[in-house]
Image: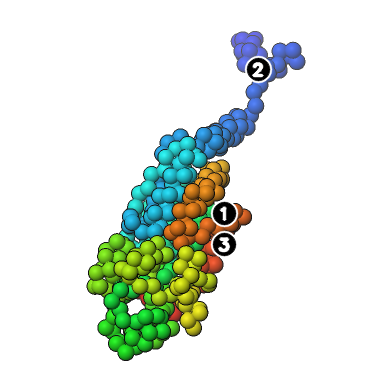
Amino acid sequence: MKASVRKAAKLRRPTTPRNNDRRVLGPHPRRRFLRLAAGTAALPAVSRVAWAQAYPTRPITMIVPIAAGSSSDVVGRLLAERMGTALGQPIIIENVPGADGSIGVGRVARARPDGYTIEFGALTMNVLNGAFYSLSYDLLGDLTPISPVATVPFVLYAKASLPAKDLKELIAWLRANPNKASAGVISVGFRMMMALFQKETRTRFTFVPYRGVAPELQDLVGGRIDFFFESPIQLPLMRAGNIKAYAVTSDARLSEAADIPTFSEMGLPSVSYSAWLGLFAPKNVPQEIVGKLNAAAVEALADQAVRSRLADLGYEVYPRGHQTPEALGALRKAAVEKWWPIIKELGVRAE
């Protein structure tokens, strides 16, 4: 009996294998898991790099947050066509107006950061509307600058039948007829400048809001409103005698309309303003894609046909050294610091 117990215990006793009998064990399970996790995490990064290198493989949508027919829309279409050639894929314009551009900009801010949705923006919708609206996105944090495009001043146009021959006579007429004149406005930029003009000239007149420049221009030519601010794109109508032009908001006279004085010359230096246009993408777009879009924009802006057309429209292309994401980011920041306090001081409200 005792011998049987001793024999059973001996059978259960663990034995230590000899050195030449030891098994080769794999890494510790936890280490194996960490290695696998690291490899899995690396896959998307590698995939993102390859995807960015192949970009673009399909058409790109360019959101223009303003109605078709405006000078900004014309410039956006011109740039999109030339950039599409450089990128090897078409860029399709989609006008998304409303709420002074914030609807279109918001759509870009919420788009997938894959480079297939970009914005042709401007000072008005990418800076100024932040002082007018409680936005659902962060103007500075949710949009990635690609490149500034061009800058353009405003011209104060008036209906042809207005009795004033120059800006001084216009101001005198407005003071003699308080609240009898009407001014068209189509965006926060024009509304701000019209309010600034009203304050600096100590005049009072009615603001008439419009959804786009086409109906506003039609009403000015037809005499249903008295004046408005617009870009130099309307100068041909002035030369044809359909409307008048009193002054320009640029620091110097326009080369294409040297007979129109600046507001500064006429004793109103604070009524100076130049809007800029620029390209933006959603935040978190890979830098490789931002670089490709920037290179396409630079190539487009170097095209002599593009530059000539922009000059005809009254736009000045930024120098090559300023056609960078960093330059556009700096323009945006400076505009916020300058114009937001002025808008609040003027008490201007969104329509």
Instruction: Please identify, in this view, whether the residue under mark 2 or under mark 3 is nearer the observer.
Output: 3
In this rendering, the answer to whether 257 lies above or below 36 is below
Residue at numbered disc 3: 330
Q: Nearer the viewer, residue 116 or 4?
A: 116
Q: CA distance from mark 1 to mark 2?
A: 80 Å
Q: Residue at x 43, y 54 (%)?
A: 75
Q: Which mark is in front, 1 or 2?
A: 1
Q: Quadrant of residue 22?
A: top right
Identify the residue position indicated by label 2 in the image: 13
Given residues 127 and 297, the one toward you in this image is 297
Measured in 3D between alpha carbons, the distance from the residue under mark 2 to the one under mark 3, in whole angstroms, is 78 Å
Q: Are marks 1 and 2 in contact (CB under 8 Å)?
A: no
Residue 297 visible in the current orientation: no
Q: Secondary structure at mark 2?
A: loop
Residue holding disc 1:
323
Q: Earlier in the sequence, mark 1 or mark 2?
A: 2
Q: Earlier in the sequence, mark 2 or mark 3?
A: 2
